[in-house]
Image: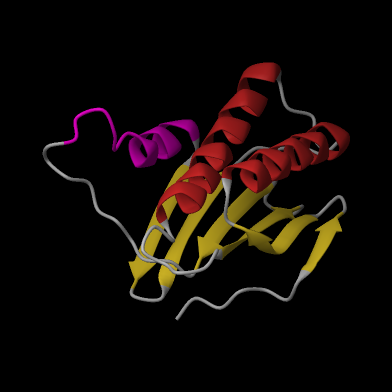
Amino acid sequence: MIDSMSTGEVANAERFERAGITADAGTAARTREEFTHWLHQFFDLDPVRTIDVVLAINEALANSAEFAYLLATRPGTMDVQARYDTRDARLTVTISDNGLWRGATADNRTRGRGIPLMRALSDRAMVETSSSGTRVCLEWSDVHQV
């Protein structure tokens, strides 16, 4: 089972967390903006790498907001946790929800590019699914603080 983190917001040089946030498009957009501000404030990334990181986490947030709770009778939540490892200069971002995984369908050719996009934009991408939620973990190496 994928457990949500305790409700709260954290943002410092080593962590960015948003826990128990509503899984909808507006919250996903606001979280993306807050995360982007955090990147600019604490990390020395070139513009292309910044766009790669933001686009990858946006895709994970959007997937959770759009698909995780399609069959639910009430709004669901999602958690975002970013950690920076100073020893390895590695940024790891995890987006998780407690919704149901919806696999790609063969008849829908205009969808299903999110996971390949996340994999292309990050140094490492993992997607874990279960009956109790989905967890996307994205990593970037050689990330340096300001």
* Looking at the image, residue 74 lies above or below residue 36: below
- Residue at point 65% right, 42% down? 26
- The answer to if 116 sits in the magenta stretch is yes
- Residue at point 48% right, 53% down? 64
- Residue at point 60% right, 34% down? 53
Q: Is residue 4 left or right of 85 when viewed as pictured? A: left
* Location of residue 25 (image quadrant): top right
> For the view shown, which residue lies furthest in the front direction?
73
Give the quarter of the figure containing the N terminus: bottom left
The percent position of residue 118, horizontal first and vertical second, equals 44, 38
> For the view shown, which residue lies furthest in the bottom direction?
1
- The answer to if 11 sits in the magenta stretch is no
Q: Is residue 142 left or right of 100 when viewed as pictured? A: right
The percent position of residue 139, horizontal first and vertical second, equals 55, 47
* Looking at the image, residue 84 lies above or below residue 41: below
Give the quarter of the figure containing the C terminus: top right
The percent position of residue 17, horizontal first and vertical second, equals 74, 59
Q: Which residues are magenta?
A: 108-121
